[in-house]
Amino acid sequence: MASADVGWPEQEELKFGFIKLTDMAPLAVAYEKGFFEDEGLYVTLEAQANWKVLLDRVITGELDGAHMLAGQPLAATIGYGTKADIITPFSMDLNGNGITVSNSVWAQMKKNIPHQDGKPVHPIKADTLKPIIASYADEGKAFKMGMVFPVSTHNYELRYWLASGGIHPGYYAPHKGDTSGQIKAEVLLSVTPPPQMPATMEAGTIDGYCVGEPWNQQAVFKGIGVPVITDYEIWKNNPEKVFGITKAFAEENPNTTTRLVKALIRAAEWLDANNNANRPEAVRILAKPDYVGADYDVIANSMTGTFEYEKGDKRDVPDFNVFFRYNATYPYYSDAIWYLTQMRRWGQISEPKSDDWYKEIAAQVYRPDLYRLAAQALIDEGVIAADAFPAFATETGFKPVQDGFIDGISYNGLLPNDYLNKFSIGLKDEIL
């Protein structure tokens, strides 16, 4: 398709929502670098109070699209929490989250962690946390941790890490009206909006949390907690946020959809170009109050290829935030299916489903066909080379079998039930 074949946008003025996290960067960059305007789109970006408000406003049409948790379009489509046809033509990033514990928890965990050259050996396994949880139980106290939303990557990553260390994070049973996620739980997980995580932990309401940046690094800067592991160490190059729109919006505005995806692809490519050379400029953009609104140094700590664990223990993590390389923006069906497996593992999907069901839902929500229209236009215009994208003629939407998980379990998106059967903690064929 030549660029001239992408017709004029049906809707030129658009309002997109986001949450104050560094992985909203493609939206901010597309706006600030003029990529939206190059497509004839006049966009307003608006921070939202929390993920539920954001999703509700996309469903009602108050927002034309939004930076979303990958689980949100999937959960909405299957009717978990709310029911709506939300799709994604663009994945926003890989990695970018961390798990942080309070200073007092860290002081106890540290005794259980091997050290080398005076520093803790990473990745830190959850079994080092298990004795602290047991001591809480002995004292009749609950060990509490925060995550950002029931269908968030953070909820699933935190659960994955805990379960890999033999700690049960609890089940959901929506068919019984139980959406607490705390059935059989050894750790009580609850929802806290991302920017409020550090203050909530500092107040003692929670003992730790899983969240995106800059809210782990802010705990280090404030001296109130220690990030113990990044999600890159839990699952190397895991898929993170998506850009969500309603199915109706895409059908009514096909040219606008293609053009906004073009702008987002250009922004993602800019963010990773020349070995992250543009990241300092991106950090200055994100530090503005209209976007993330945190200090430059706090945002830069993770956005420029490093990550600080315990104060002063800053290590190179060049892929902590990935926006374009490794085909990060392509909406893979296998990524969608991984999220669905975690919904089933923890009971948000009450009953076992066939492998075909997982594939059908993934194909309803993740739309590589829409992504390809935008990518092909950019290739035809000479803006981005074809070899920067998947080979569209042969791409199936399923990544090869993936390793690199902290528990050593491999994931094949073509065999979701086989994957679920590998876990020692988690639902398989049973119904609670």
Image (cartoon, rainbow, N blue to C red):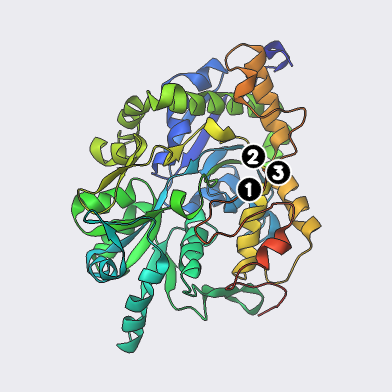
Residue position marked by numbered label 1 in the rendering: 335
Q: Secondary structure at mark 1?
A: helix
Q: Is residue 31 visible?
A: no
Q: Nearer the viewer, mark 3 or mark 1?
A: 3
Q: Residue type at mark 2: give it.
A: Pro
* x and y, in percent, of residue 174 in the image: 63, 73
Nearest to N terminus: mark 3 or mark 2: 2
Judge whether 4 appears above or below 202 on screen.
above
Residue occupying the point 42% across, 50% down: 97
Image disc number at residue 365: none
Q: Are marks 2 and 1 in contact (CB under 8 Å)?
A: yes
The 10 Å Cα crowd at callout 1, few under 14, some 14 to 19, many 20 or more, is many
* x and y, in percent, of residue 405 in the image: 53, 55
- Of the 4 image quadrants, the one containing the C terminus is bottom right
Residue occupying the point 68% across, 21% down: 376
Residue position marked by numbered label 2 in the rendering: 331
Q: Residue type at mark 3: give it.
A: Phe
- Of the 4 image quadrants, the one containing the N terminus is top right
CA gap, disc 3 to disc 1?
8 Å
Observer-nearest residue: 245 or 384?
384
Report which quarter residue 299 is drawn in. Answer: top left
CA gap, disc 3 to disc 2?
10 Å
Residue position marked by numbered label 3 in the rendering: 398
